[in-house]
Amino acid sequence: MQNDCKHCPFNTRATTMLSEESFGQLSDNHLELKFKKGDTIIKQGMFSTNVVFLRRGLAKIHLNGPYHEQIVRLVKAPTYLGLPTTFGDKVNQYSVTAVTDTDVCYIDVNIFQKILNENRDFSNEIIVELCQNELESFKRCANRTQKQIRGNMADALLEFAENIFYSDIFTLPISQSELANLVDTSRESVSRVLSEFDKDGLIAISGKNIELLNKKSLRLISQNG
Amino acid sequence: MQNDCKHCPFNTRATTMLSEESFGQLSDNHLELKFKKGDTIIKQGMFSTNVVFLRRGLAKIHLNGPYHEQIVRLVKAPTYLGLPTTFGDKVNQYSVTAVTDTDVCYIDVNIFQKILNENRDFSNEIIVELCQNELESFKRCANRTQKQIRGNMADALLEFAENIFYSDIFTLPISQSELANLVDTSRESVSRVLSEFDKDGLIAISGKNIELLNKKSLRLISQNG
DNA sequence: ATTATTTTGTGATATGCATCACAACACCTA
DNA sequence: TAGGTGTTGTGATGCATATCACAAAATAAT
């Protein structure tokens, strides 16, 4: 509604090649929204007729586990959210919550499907992304279950620095409780391990700010538990 | 090579609608193979130019974890295997091993891609399958980490009965060691829990044969840890 | 500012499960 | 039929980490 999608800076190699008609429909059938940190972007159990394109920001995917809410992964822009809803029974199977302030586009499901069908590059792109997610799930599964806390914590810190913030200095985007949930441990263990890492000179903590001082050692810890 | 794909009984709603030309190319560019229980169907690290269609049988997906091989899931026919290879760098990112005797088709990557591009129903089908896999990964992740051994074992047994063998009496398709690996525990714990379940009258064990006697209780255990 | 609420640090304790150890089977091979 | 090789059952022990408990610090609310 607001903008012309054709000139959106978030177009990828595949989406820049859409037809004029597709761009027109897309422009007319999307909704740009801003979410504040902590806002719910997708709510598990709700009926939805939109795909969500996360343009800017960081979000967490979480769902109802048998006992408590479980964060299964952090996702960073740009990415599409809610594809399993779109291609399933139109009921959100997980929740997505903004971890930072976030810009998203809600795209009507039918338009999205239509564009997908008319643009093989785009549908390939989606398939590639889904395949990569699958692989990551597999690897995370193997890691989480075989490593112990220090290893998983080291992984998480390296992940933040290398794949999310692209800097060895960053502010923890989530609370220690959430981090504990994400790496499958307890809040207290997260606190203890961070203290240990700090004491051992691997990281420097000041409040929520963390600097990785010795990534080599962190990688070693990641490998040796 | 062997058969005409058009008359293959494993065609789905989407694949029966392929063009004559596509069927011709498919027939000329696929390889039907049989694998014995224990055979390697896909080998992690190997270069591959094929998608594998699992037509009949049961297989396990496993990959190199940080310390040891990790089974991430069992898959049953019909399904496509190796999609992340096809849509990635053509190097297998995981291994697949036949758990029962198995029939598969090796389909040339280029043909597969071509057919995918020419058939929106088929590519939708693939996207749907990938989305479902993602959801399952999420749920399994939440379950595995929140439940304890008895709960995960109950899940595994119910999964065998309800989603794989469609019968409350079945033969364990994998060894206790493998099962332990799959449910993230030790071989000894698997043995112990099975004994307990048997002692409590929830299941009846004779050799590798298992009968579920009280699925309601198993579901309860699944929920309460 | 002052109170209320959430987040964090750290000790003490409890426990689920891995690991070790070894015996009893089962299964293939010669 | 024996003898190797992998699988399974079950006790004893140890350890990583969850849980409990509470204080300190930070953040939000009034």
Image (tube, coloured by chain):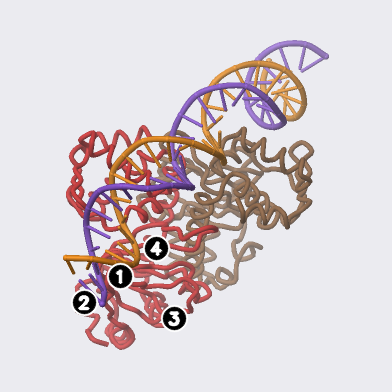
Chain colours: A brown, B red, C purple, D orange
Q: Which residue is mark 1?
A: B54
Chain designation of label 3: B
The amino acid type of the residue labelled 4 equals Ile
Residue B171, by quadrant, is bottom left
Q: Which residue is mark 2?
A: B8
Q: Which residue is mark 4?
A: B61
The amino acid type of the residue labelled 1 equals Leu
Query: Which element is circle 2 on?
Result: loop
Which is nearer the eye, D20 or D4?
D4
- Is A197 left or right of A55, judged from the image as shown? right
Whether label 2 touches label 3, CB < 8 Å: no
The amino acid type of the residue labelled 3 equals Thr
Q: Which residue is mark 3?
A: B49
Above or below, A64 relative to B10? above
* Sequence-first disc among 2 and 4: 2
Which is in the foreground here, disc 1 or disc 4?
4
